[in-house]
Amino acid sequence: MNNSYWIHSINLKSFPKLEKDLEVTVAIIGGGITGLSTAYYLSQNGYDVCILEKDKLAHHATGNTTAKVTSQHDLFYDYLIHTFGKSFAKSYLDANEEAIKNIKEIIDTEKIDCDFEWQDAYVYTDLEDEVIKIKNEVTSVNSLDFPAEFVTDSSLPFPIKACIKFPNQAQFHPLKYVKGLSDCIVQNGGQIYENTKVYDIDKKDDFYEIRTDNHTIHAKYVVLACHYPIVNTPGFYFLKMYQETSYLIGFTTDSKLFDGMYINTKSPICSLRTVPYKEDKRLVLMGGSEHKTGVKEDLSDCYLNLENRAKELFPDANVLYRWNTEDCISLDKIPYIGEFSQMMPHMYIATGFKKWGMTTSNIAANIITDMIMGKENPYAETFKSTRFNPVKNGTEFVDMLKQTTTSLVLDKFKIPKDTLGSINKDEGKIVEVENTKLGIYRDTEGKYFCLKPICSHLGCELSWNNLDKTWDCPCHGSRFSYTGKSLYDPSIKDIELINID
């Protein structure tokens, strides 16, 4: 189920599919908040820009976010100081604080009505042994000249042990903001194309050749703002990131609501914020139930766990929306922003936002715009995408390699225990049919949908997601519908259905 409040509550303008060959200065692949923010800044500076979106604008990560506009990214700054140093942590914080101001400036300048609200942001705990982590975080953030506060109470409807407060953060309606950006881009002469999937990018002499299903775009600069890079080499980002899926619900309640934006310190994660709703009411958004994409587990309770928690806190909670999304996470937890590779000049990337894409998208847009314009950006080195550092998170790196090896090699040699006859209605399994492993979903009417359960990205064996009825890649996070349609990158190609009648 994917019934995002953001997508449901606004009718975005539709844009045409690309129906001709095109020559532009800058081609941006991906029509989420990062691609649109970049196109906004470039078009403001007179650049000939086009956006190529494979589906509809902002209907993936941007349309399924919590939309917290904040520099508070969990308990993160103590980690940054101890891992990269105080100067690095200060730069990361300053970049995100500047992004909040930039977003507000765009909203004010362009008069975008997007429910922007100043809110304090909190990371809280109800566990005694987590209090020391919050105290350490407060000390670290204060050392960066930011007025974070240690707080022992809150307006939440349950007791806490402690929390860290970031004042003067914000929240908004991301698709209303996106609508404002797209209007400005078109007014500035930019071009936007939906339902235009990019399949290939080649470097020519002094330009890039970008191919869709029927047409070719020539561009001097290319920006990969497509969540996860669809180009594998020479950047090799698939070796440096993994994807995580998380879930949200939206509900109304007549109970007293809280002020601010909240997230707790330890799994199971509980993220909370409110949003203006109908007739002066507010909708409560609760997020959590996170897991690595493609995990071979029963996922049927991911929404149920959130709903049970909501009803514990607000007994009259009326759940109206349920949705989920994927986020790219780099192994050192720092986004990759800048050059895609030193071997491919004039191609840029923005990925690995670690679930904090509202501010990071603006940071990325400014860094990439400055690079294209030949200007220095004070934060470019902090987010340098071509950095080559020792892996900071050895455990996750080893886990990722193990999972990739298992899915690429070992799983392909396992003989499935299940057979075609063992598949119940509304169930999917990997089974053996005539000595061939097949992924089969049987719908509620008993019809079979069969495909080879191999990811079209790099060939990992897919896992069945029994909640969303999708085939998910445990290696790099690609997702496919049970009909084989590519839903989430880095996969580009669909998987063909196989007739087993």
Image (cartoon, rainbow, N blue to C red):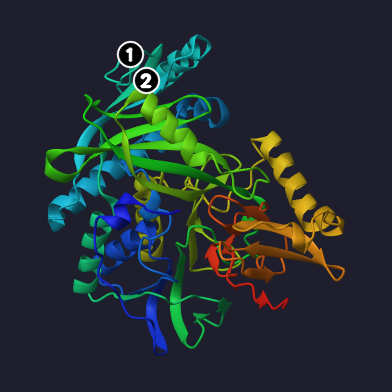
Can you say which quadrant of the picture contains the C terminus?
bottom right
Residue on which disc 1 sits: 151
Pointer 1 local density, CA inside 10 Å: few below 14, some 14–19, many at least 20: some
- Tell me, yes or no, whether the two marked residues, 1 and 2, touch with CB atoms within 8 Å: yes
Disc with the residue nearer the chain's start (1 vs 2):
1
| Image: 495 above or below 146 | below
* Residue 331 image position (x, y, % from top left): 61, 42
| Image: 371 above or below 187 | above
Q: Which disc, if any, is residue 2? A: none
Q: Secondary structure at mark 1?
A: strand
Quadrant of residue 273 within the rendered picture? top left
Quadrant of residue 276 within the rendered picture? top left
Q: Nearer the viewer, residue 77 or 406?
A: 406
* Residue 410 image position (x, y, % from top left): 84, 53
Q: Nearer the viewer, residue 156 or 3?
A: 3
* Residue 335 image position (x, y, % from top left): 50, 46
Query: Is residue 458 visible to us here?
Result: no
| Image: 78 above or below 108 | above
* Residue 153 image position (x, y, % from top left): 31, 12
Quadrant of residue 409 within the rendered picture? bottom right
Q: Nearer the viewer, residue 48 or 406?
A: 406
Residue on which disc 2 sits: 164
Query: Is residue 196 visible to us here?
Result: yes
Pointer 2 local density, CA inside 10 Å: few below 14, some 14–19, many at least 20: many
Q: Nearer the viewer, residue 306 or 126?
A: 306
Relative side of 95 to 332, left or right: left
User: What residue lies at 39% left-to-right and 51% top-to-bottom?
Assistant: 64
Hey, what amino acid is under mark 1?
Val
Q: Secondary structure at mark 2?
A: strand
Hey, what amino acid is under mark 2?
Ile
Relative side of 63 to 226, left or right: left
